[in-house]
Image: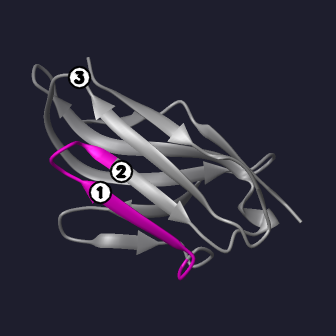
C-alpha cells in the first residue's frame, strides 16, 4: 500500500515563511506528477504547484515568485517553500501524486492535508 504523508505548515505572520514536506511511502513502482493543492474554507480545492518530468515547476499565478516546489526523486519526497506569505494563503494544503504501486495500477493519491494559517 502506498501513501503520502505531509509535515510542516502551521501559523505564520504575513510576510513570513513556512515549508511543507511530503513523503511517499510503501511499495512504489513509479511516480509521475507530484504537486501541492490547497483548499480554503468555502472554496474549491485549487492547484498551487506541480512538478513532473516534463514540467518542473508549474505554479498558480497567485503564488508565482513566492513559492518554490522541489522534488527529490531518489527519496520520493516533495517540498514547498512558501515565502512572503499573505493572509489569502490560509488554507489546508494537500500533497498529491500520481503513483503506481508495485502490484497495482497508476492512480491519484492524496495526503491527509496540513493547515497553513497566515495572520495579518
> Which residue lies at the image location 71% right of the left edge and 50% below the top edge?
91
Residue 78 numbered mark, or none: 2
Q: Earlier in the sequence, mark 1 or mark 2?
A: 1
- x then y, percent, for residue 53: 18, 64
Q: CA distance from mark 1 to mark 2?
A: 4 Å
State the quadrant of the N terminus.
Answer: top left
In the displayed image of the protein, which residue is found farthest to the bottom?
65
**Label 3 near label 1: C-beta < 8 Å?**
no
Relative to residue 87, is residue 75 drawn left or right?
left
SS class, disc 2: strand
**Label 2 near label 1: C-beta < 8 Å?**
yes
As for residue 71 lying within the magenta part, the answer is yes
| Pointer 3 residue | 26
- x then y, percent, for residue 113: 57, 36
Please, is residue 70 above or below residue 10 in the view?
Answer: below
State the scheme by which the image is colored. one colour
Please, is residue 113 above or below residue 16 in the view?
Answer: above
SS class, disc 3: loop
State the quadrant of the C terminus.
Answer: bottom right
Please, is residue 4 above or below residue 69 in the view?
Answer: above
> Which residue lies at the image location 16% right of the left edge and 23% below the top edge?
27
Q: CA distance from mark 1 to mark 3?
A: 17 Å
| Pointer 1 residue | 71
Magenta range is 64-77
Asked whether residue 3 is in view, the answer is yes
At label 3, counting other C-alpha atoms closer than 10 Å, the crowd grade (few under 14, some 14-19, many 20 or more) is few
Q: Quadrant of residue 118?
A: bottom right
> Which residue lies at the image location 24% right of the left edge and 42% below the top edge?
76
Amino acid at each position: 500500500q502506498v501513501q503520502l504523508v505531509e509535515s510542516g505548515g502551521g501559523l505564520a505572520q504575513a510576510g513570513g515563511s513556512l515549508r511543507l514536506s511530503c513523503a511517499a511511502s510503501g511499495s512504489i513502482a513509479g511516480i509521475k506528477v507530484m504537486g501541492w493543492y490547497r483548499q480554503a474554507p468555502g472554496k474549491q480545492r485549487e492547484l498551487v504547484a506541480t512538478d513532473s518530468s516534463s514540467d518542473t515547476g508549474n505554479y498558480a499565478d497567485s503564488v508565482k515568485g513566492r513559492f518554490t516546489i522541489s522534488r527529490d526523486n531518489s527519496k520520493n519526497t516533495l517540498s514547498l517553500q512558501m515565502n512572503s506569505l499573505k493572509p489569502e494563503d490560509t488554507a489546508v494544503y494537500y500533497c498529491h501524486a500520481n503513483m503506481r504501486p508495485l502490484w497495482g495500477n497508476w492512480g491519484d493519491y492524496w495526503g491527509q492535508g496540513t493547515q497553513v494559517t497566515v495572520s495579518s
